[in-house]
Image (spheres, helix red, strand yellow):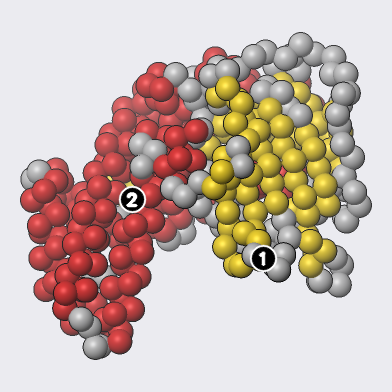
Amino acid sequence: MNRLASVPLDTAVSAPAPVHAGAAVVRLTLTDFRCYARLRLDPEATSAVLTGPNGAGKTNLLEALSYLAPGRGLRRARLGDPDRRLPDGSVAGRWSAAIVISTGGDCVTIGTGHEIDGEGQTNGRRIVRRDGAPLSAHRDLAALAAVVWLTPDMDGLFRDGAAGRRAFLDRLVCGFAAEHAGEVAAYQHCLRERARLLAEKAGDATWLDALEDGMARHGVAVAAARLAAVARLDRATRAGIGPFPSARLEMAGEIEDWLQRMPALAAEDKLRAALAAGRDMDAATGGAAVGPHRADLVVFFAGRDVPAVQCSTGEQKALLLSIVLAHARELAAERGTPPIMLLDEVVAHLDGARRAALFDEIAALGAQAWLTGTDDELFAGLRSRARFFRVLDATVTPR
Ligand SMILES: Nc1ncnc2c1ncn2[C@@H]1O[C@H](COP(=O)(O)OP(=O)(O)O)[C@@H](O)[C@H]1O
Ligand SMILES: [Mg+2]
């Protein structure tokens, strides 16, 4: 698994590739990223189909692309997790990724990986560069391109805790509001700092006030952006997309309820007051009893009006895909650019009609989709509309 990956440059590809309207990856270069010692891939802005056996390196490749979104990528990895390891567990090298994306005719290179200090060692932080210059803010990344993903790890999204659903929703919200990731990060920072201060018990009241003010401002902004996005997604998913199930979406949460009844500034005041009043209890529990970190995205299978959690695994997967496609439609309509879609092992679970509808929808949206699977027969409907790559033992070759 540690062989040098082949470099599929200058390789003739038979099918003419449609030019995509949305932001699209035109080149991906990886160094010491999980199973890839080195990889360079030139999908040239078309959708890409990656097929190969289990353990070949397909999800790793999508994971690298998921670093185009603010956050820790589709595996929610710690900084050093993607470092390529040898069979004995030792680190063969620190990872880096360079992703060239085309957006509206311009090409931009996003580089990311460990931030390296003067001694050539990692300083424990990840750096993101745009054309060589460090990017500080989440919004700069989110503004460039929206990236969404569906992976087998998300099969339990409706069954598991609300945190996964909030993270999923927040990625969708970033497409509508680039500042959202920064607001979420700022809120979480204040939440953590406040919990730390409360735990120390020597709480400086002025500092606590300031943190709670930050929680109120960022928290209400986060809740409002989620509410607005959920309302849009609800409208779009209810309408239904071809043979995909219609979904009904709601936000459940206290701040969200307040925002339905009062202006945002009043909700901020109410949250600030609730936090101040809840210090003793929050000190005991180590969290905060109120705030957008307690909200949940509630999804119903619209036709039968049952909660998604009560649906079959197959129906739950189809609902998720409905939401992701509705999101892409909304983005394409609003910004003129659909998100880059990373669809890991999604196609194998769809029947023929839904498979065909998915491929048609990707083409109609002008989105760049990255699709993986073990069986390339299932992707026959994409033959003339995507580039096909074979992934085998960390080697990616055009078909
Ligand atoms: N940090 C790492 N260093 C080296 N290899 C890794 C690392 N993390 C995962 N791998 C290996 O990468 C291989 C491919 O994984 P993955 O991309 O998930 O495969 P799949 O093609 O089934 O999606 C696996 O064999 C896994 O053990
Ligand atoms: Mg995989």
- The picture quadrant where one finds residue 233 is top left
**Of residues 123 and 316, the one drawn nearer to the viewer in this rendering:** 123
In x, y percent, where is residue 86? 85, 65
In x, y percent, where is residue 324? 48, 34
Report crowding for label 2: few under 14, some 14 to 19, many 20 or more residues within 10 A (C-alpha): many
- The amino acid type of the residue labelled 2 equals Glu
Residue at position x 24%, y 67% in the image: 211
Task: Report which residue position mark 2 lands on.
Answer: 183
**Of residues 311 and 155, the one drawn nearer to the viewer in this rendering:** 155
Query: Which numbered disc, 2 or 1, marks the residue closer to the eye?
Result: 1
Image position of 85 (left or right of 245): right
Mark before the other along the chain sequence, 2 or 1: 1
- The amino acid type of the residue labelled 1 equals Gly
Residue at position x 84%, y 38% in the image: 396
| Quadrant of the rendering where the N terminus is positioned | bottom right
Q: Which mark is residue 118?
A: 1
Q: Secondary structure at mark 2?
A: helix
In x, y percent, where is residue 46? 68, 22
Residue at position x 88%, y 56% in the image: 2
